Image (cartoon, grey):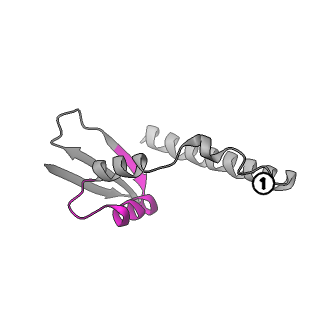
């Protein structure tokens, strides 16, 4: 199986070639790439690592009630952080589309 990894402006692209299905290319930030690289087992492709990690994750229903004791101030701070992350992601995506 051939693997192609490239780094451009701290964004890593990984293309997994050689599977029986269509391959897709995704872009991830350098910090996510480093985390995934550390979590990847020896001899494991990035696709296999992602599949393993997703399947080992918990269910969304297990998160119900985790934030029940959060104050209104903490909730507003969390919402603000999520909105800022969305704006930042949208800005980065627009830069990619323009390029």
Label 1 packing within 10 angstroms: few (<14), some (14-19), many (20+): few
Reply yes or no: does residue 92 show up in magenta: no
- Picture coordinates of residue 91 (x, y %)? 57, 44
Position of residue 71 relative to residue 87, above or below, is below
Q: Nearer the viewer, residue 56 or 91?
A: 56
Magenta segment range? Answer: 26-45
In the shown orientation, is residue 21 left or right of residue 72? Answer: left
Give me the residue at 44% from left, 58% from top.
32
- Picture coordinates of residue 21 (x, y %)? 21, 33
Q: Which of 59 and 99 is in front in this view?
A: 59
Give me the residue at 35% from left, 46% from top.
51
Position of residue 77 relative to residue 19, above or below, is below
- Picture coordinates of residue 64 (x, y %)? 68, 44
For the view shown, which residue lies furthest in the right direction? 72
Position of residue 99 relative to residue 5, above or below, is above
Helix, strand or loop for disc 1: helix
In the shown orientation, is residue 57 left or right of residue 75? Answer: left
Q: Name the residue under label 1.
A: 77
Considering the image in quadrants, where does the C terminus appear?
Answer: top left
Reply yes or no: does residue 35 show up in magenta: yes
In the shown orientation, is residue 23 left or right of residue 85? Answer: left
């Amino acid at each position: 199986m051939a693997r192609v990894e490239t780094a451009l402006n701290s964004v890593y692209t990984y293309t997994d070639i050689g599977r029986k299905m269509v391959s897709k290319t995704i872009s991830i930030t350098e910090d996510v790439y480093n985390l995934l690289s550390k979590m990847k087992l020896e001899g494991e492709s990035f696709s296999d690592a992602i599949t393993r990690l997703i399947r080992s994750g918990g269910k969304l229903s297990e998160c119900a009630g985790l934030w029940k004791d959060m104050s209104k101030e903490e909730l507003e701070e969390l919402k603000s952080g999520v909105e800022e992350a969305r704006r930042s992601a949208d800005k980065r995506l627009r830069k990619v589309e323009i390029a």
